[in-house]
């Protein structure tokens, strides 16, 4: 995975989870939504990395 793509997933996940932490004091539903989106964003980063490694023939 390129450094820019890795940085994008890292920063966007931090922002989503930070917004989730802030939203806890305002709305439980908004906090849950942002938490799920943050975890899904992290998972999607792993999926992209695995697909790129598989395409390049890397097994690790």
Image (tube, helix red, strand yellow):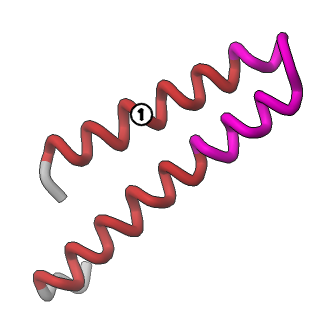
Q: Nearer the viewer, residue 49 or 33?
A: 33
User: Does 58 sit above or below residue 40?
Assistant: below
Residue located at (80% from left, 19% from top): 24
Q: Nearer the viewer, residue 59 or 15?
A: 15
Quadrant of the rendering where the C terminus is positioned: bottom left
Displayed quadrant of residue 9? top left
Residue 30 is covered by the magenta coloring: yes
Residue 57: % across, % down: 14, 88
Residue 37: % across, % down: 61, 44
Q: Which residue ends up furthest to the right in the rendered image?
A: 28
Residue 40: % across, % down: 57, 53
Quadrant of the rendering where the N terminus is positioned: bottom left
The residue stretch that appears in magenta: 22-38
User: Does 36 sit above or below residue 17?
Assistant: below
User: Does 48 sit above or below residue 57?
Assistant: above
Q: Is residue 43 left or right of residue 56?
A: right
Q: Is residue 29 left or right of residue 34?
A: right
In the structure shown, which secondary structural element does the residue marked by tag 1 occupy? helix
Residue 34: % across, % down: 67, 35
Residue located at (59% from left, 30% from top): 17
Q: Is residue 41 left or right of residue 8?
A: right
| Number of on-image labels | 1
Q: Which residue is the site of mark 1?
A: 12
Magenta portion: prevailing SS class: helix
Residue located at (74% from left, 18% from top): 23
């Amino acid at each position: 995975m390129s450094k820019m793509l890795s940085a994008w997933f890292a920063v966007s996940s931090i922002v989503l989870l930070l917004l989730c932490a802030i939203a806890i004091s305002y709305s439980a539903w908004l906090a849950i939504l942002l938490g799920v989106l943050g975890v899904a964003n992290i998972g999607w980063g792993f999926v992209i990395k695995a697909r790129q490694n598989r395409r390049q023939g890397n097994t690790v």
